[in-house]
Image (cartoon, rainbow, N blue to C red):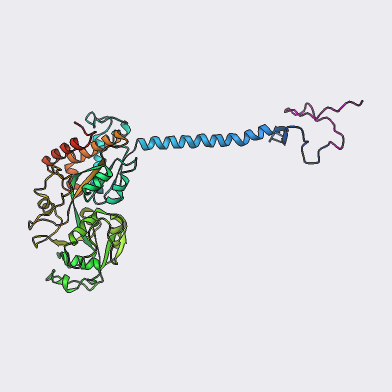
C-alpha cells in the first residue's frame, strides 16, 4: 500500500520551509493559494510572508468591528442622556427672550460654584452654576407644548392659559415681568413725526381694507403729517405667538375684525414671518411695511414705533411710564390662577399693549430636581434682576407682588421652597 503524501504545511517565518511538493492534480492554479480544510484565504501581508486565514478568523474580522460599533453607539447614547440630565432648558416667548437671555447670564454669575451665595438647590453643580441653563425662543404656544417634554423644565408665555387648560396640562402659571408689544413700521416720516393708529385703522390694515398709508382713515388720525401713498405690507407671525394673542385682543373691539383673538389666527393676506426675529427682518426689508414685536427688539433694529389709542381715547407709545400706569392696581395674589391678569386700565396715560409675561412649570414633574432648579432660576428673575428688567426694556413686578407669587407657589407646587 502506498503511503499518503503529507498535506502541505505553511509557517509564519520565511526562509525555513516551503510547501511540500504536490502532484500536478493537487497543485494550485497559478495565482491561487492551495485549498486546505478550514482555510478560506491565503493572505500575503506587506512583509511577503504567507499567512493562512481560517473561516473562524474571517468571522472574527467581521464580528469585531460590529461589536466595536455597538459599544461606541451605546457610549454615545449614554453620554447624550447624561448631557440631557445636566441640561436645564426653558422655552417659549420671543417677546420675553431678551429678559430671559440676560437673566441667564446674570444667574450664571450669581450662581457660580465658587460663590458661597449661589442658589442652594440640590443637584448637579454643572447645572447649579448656570452653565447648563438654556432658553429656546420657539414662541409662547411652542413653549407651552414643549413643557410636556422631559427635557424642558419651564415655559415662558405672553398670554395666560385658561383654568381648564391649566388643569388639563397639570401646570402652574404665574407672572414673571411686564413687557410691551410695539407696533413697528418701516415708513419714512418727517423728522419728529410719530405715526398714530387706533383699533379701527390697525384692524383695517390687517384685514386688507386699508392698503395705502395716505388712506383718509389714517390721515385723519395724523393731522399735520404728510403720509406717502406707499402700499402697506402687513407682516404677521406664522407661529403660535403671545404677541399675536396680545395684538388680536386689542383688535377684537374694532368693527370689521372677524379673525377673533388668540395665539394663532387666520390672517387675510399680508406676509407671514416666523418668530420675532423673522418679523423684524421682514419689516426692515419692505418699505411701507408694519408689524408687531417687543419694543426693545424693534428699537434695536432701527424700526419706528407707533402710538396707539387707548381706552381713554389718548394716543400713547410704549414707554416705561405708560407701562407702569397700565399695570397699576393689578392683583398678584393668584386667586384665579393668574388667568385674568391682563391690564385693562382706563387711564389716559396707559399703553394698551402692555403685556404681562408668564412662567409655567409642571405641578408634579418627572424630574423634580430639575424642576426645583428651574424654580430657583425663576425666583432669581423675580427677586434679583430688577436692573436687568429695565435695561432689557421690561418692568419688574412690585416687591409685594413677588411675595404673593412665592406664597402661591407654596400652595400649588409640592417642590417649592418652604
Where is residue 393? Give x, y as percent: 19, 50
310 w.r.t. 98: above or below: below
Q: Left or right of 152: which side holds 28?
A: right
Of residue 225 and residue 307, the one placed in the foreground of this image is 307
230 w.r.t. 262: above or below: below
- What secondary structure is the magenta-colored segment mainly? loop
**Residue 139 is at least partly visible in this image:** no
Query: Residue placed farthest to the right in the image?
Result: 1
Where is residue 297? Give x, y as percent: 24, 54
Of residue 258 and residue 31, the one placed in the foreground of this image is 258
Chain part drawn in magenta: 1-26
245 w.r.t. 226: above or below: above
Q: Quadrant of the C terminus?
A: top left
Where is residue 235? Give x, y as percent: 27, 63
Q: Quadrant of residue 271?
A: bottom left
Of residue 30 and residue 199, the one placed in the foreground of this image is 199
Q: Quadrant of residue 231?
A: bottom left
**Residue 338 is at least partly visible in this image:** yes
Q: How many marks?
A: 0
Where is residue 181? Give x, y as percent: 20, 55
Q: Is residue 213 magenta?
A: no
Q: Left or right of 343: which side holds 143?
A: right
Q: Quadrant of the N terminus?
A: top right
Q: Is residue 13 magenta?
A: yes
349 w.r.t. 200: above or below: above
Amino acid at each position: 500500500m502506498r503511503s499518503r503524501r503529507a498535506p502541505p504545511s505553511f509557517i509564519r517565518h520565511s526562509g525555513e520551509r516551503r510547501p511540500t511538493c504536490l502532484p500536478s492534480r493537487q497543485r494550485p492554479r497559478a495565482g491561487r493559494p492551495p485549498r486546505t480544510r478550514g482555510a478560506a484565504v491565503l493572505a500575503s501581508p506587506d512583509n511577503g510572508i504567507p499567512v493562512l486565514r481560517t473561516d473562524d478568523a474571517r468571522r472574527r474580522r467581521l464580528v469585531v468591528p460590529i461589536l466595536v460599533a455597538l459599544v461606541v453607539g451605546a457610549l454615545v447614547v449614554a453620554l447624550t442622556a447624561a448631557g440631557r440630565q445636566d441640561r436645564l432648558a426653558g422655552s417659549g416667548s420671543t417677546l420675553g427672550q431678551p429678559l430671559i437671555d440676560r437673566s441667564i447670564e446674570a444667574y450664571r454669575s450669581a450662581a457660580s460654584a465658587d460663590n458661597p451665595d449661589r442658589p442652594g438647590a440640590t443637584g448637579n453643580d454643572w447645572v447649579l452654576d448656570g452653565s447648563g441653563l438654556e432658553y429656546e425662543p420657539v414662541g409662547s404656544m411652542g413653549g407651552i407644548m414643549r413643557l410636556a417634554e422631559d427635557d424642558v423644565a419651564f415655559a415662558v408665555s405672553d398670554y395666560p392659559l385658561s383654568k381648564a387648560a391649566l388643569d388639563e396640562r397639570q401646570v402652574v402659571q404665574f407672572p414673571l415681568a411686564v413687557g410691551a408689544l410695539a407696533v413697528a413700521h418701516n415708513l419714512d416720516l418727517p423728522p419728529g413725526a410719530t405715526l398714530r393708529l387706533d383699533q379701527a385703522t390697525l384692524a383695517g390694515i390687517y384685514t386688507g381694507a386699508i392698503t395705502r398709508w395716505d388712506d383718509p382713515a389714517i390721515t385723519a388720525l395724523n393731522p399735520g403729517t404728510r403720509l406717502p401713498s406707499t402700499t402697506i405690507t402687513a407682516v404677521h407671525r406664522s407661529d403660535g405667538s403671545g404677541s399675536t394673542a396680545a395684538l388680536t385682543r386689542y383688535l377684537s373691539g374694532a368693527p370689521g375684525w372677524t379673525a377673533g383673538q388668540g395665539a394663532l389666527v387666520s390672517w387675510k393676506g399680508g406676509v407671514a414671518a416666523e418668530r420675532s426675529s423673522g418679523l423684524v427682518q421682514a419689516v426692515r426689508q419692505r418699505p411701507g411695511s408694519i408689524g408687531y414685536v417687543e419694543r426693545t427688539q424693534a428699537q434695536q433694529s432701527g424700526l419706528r414705533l407707533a402710538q396707539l389709542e387707548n381706552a381713554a381715547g389718548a394716543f400713547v407709545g410704549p414707554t416705561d411710564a405708560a407701562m407702569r400706569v397700565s399695570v397699576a392696581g393689578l392683583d398678584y395674589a393668584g386667586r384665579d390662577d393668574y388667568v385674568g391678569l391682563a391690564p385693562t386700565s382706563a387711564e389716559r396715560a396707559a399703553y394698551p399693549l402692555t403685556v404681562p409675561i408668564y412662567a409655567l412649570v409642571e405641578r408634579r414633574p418627572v424630574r423634580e430636581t430639575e424642576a426645583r432648579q428651574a424654580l430657583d432660576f425663576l425666583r432669581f428673575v423675580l427677586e434679583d434682576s430688577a436692573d436687568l428688567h429695565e435695561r432689557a426694556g421690561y418692568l419688574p413686578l412690585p416687591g409685594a407682588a413677588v411675595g404673593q407669587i412665592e406664597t402661591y407657589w407654596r400652595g400649588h407646587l409640592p417642590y417649592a421652597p418652604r
